[in-house]
Amino acid sequence: MPIQLHAFDTPNGRKISVALEEMALPYDVNVVDITKGEQHDPAFVAISPNHKIPAIVDPEGPGGMPIGIFESGAILLYLARKSGKFWPDDERAQIEVLEWLMFQMGGFGPMPGQVHHFIALADETERRYGLERYMAETRRLYGVMDQRLAGREFFAADLSIADFAILPWVWRHPRHKVDLADFPNVQRWYQALMERPAVKKGFEVSLRHPA
């Protein structure tokens, strides 16, 4: 039975659609329109008690029993272990993947997310301080990633869920007001991943209600 993906067209939602496509796991999409407050629907909150997308329900979870999972990082770890893909066997290699997954979850997500918030404010006084603070930190994080990718293809030794976690946030670089030409190693990595057929499918799948 297919996994049920509850998501919307955001970087965190795209993490999971990309991972599912790369892992060749069958799934169906249930759009949760966060612009209309659908994340507060009791049926969704029963799966995601933090009222946030994405979440999944795997009808064939551990022991063959259904399981619901919320938080994109937890979902990526679960899917990697379920599929046996993009999660290394070696413990040291696993730690490397976890480091860059946590880097995304703790920094390169929350910080650009604040840019998304402040850039949308109409009042220039309200916008200025927040944008200066969070755009500076976002650019610092791009710099960390650029340094990491110098002379290497992926964030860990091989393509992993850490790359899938980071990719959709780099996808939003125009909204961050970041020119990837300023971070050539990130740009090279981003362009290479976006050319992967499964990644393309993960970004093309509709995560919005039909207009």
Image (cartoon, grey):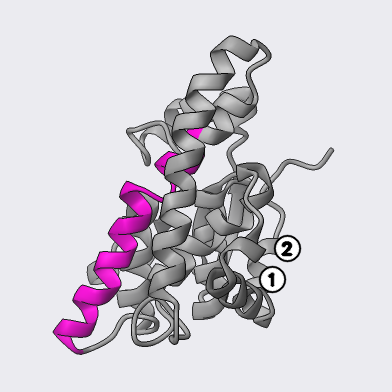
| Left or right: 112 as drawn, with respect to 174 | left
Residue 71 in sight here: yes
Which residue type does callout 1 highlight? Answer: Lys
Q: Is residue 122 above or below residue 38?
A: above
Percent position (x, y) of residue 162? Answer: 39, 69
Image quadrant of residue 204?
bottom right
Image quadrant of residue 49?
top left
Marks 2 and 1 sit apart, C-alpha to C-alpha, by 5 Å
Per the image, the residue denoted by label 1 is 201
Q: Which residues are magenta?
A: 90-114
Dominant secondary structure of the residues highlighted in magenta in the image? helix
Query: Residue 176, which numbered label?
Result: none
Percent position (x, y) of residue 46? Answer: 36, 35
Q: Residue at x 65, y 24 (%)?
A: 120
Image quadrant of residue 100?
bottom left
Which residue is at the front of the view, 200 or 51? Answer: 200
Q: Residue at x 66, y 75 (%)?
A: 191
Q: Are marks 2 and 1 in contact (CB under 8 Å)?
A: yes
Percent position (x, y) of residue 186? Answer: 54, 69
Which residue is at the front of the view, 44 or 162? Answer: 162
| Left or right: 60 as drawn, with respect to 193 | left
* Count of marks, rendered view: 2
Per the image, the residue denoted by label 2 is 204
Secondary structure beneath label 2: helix
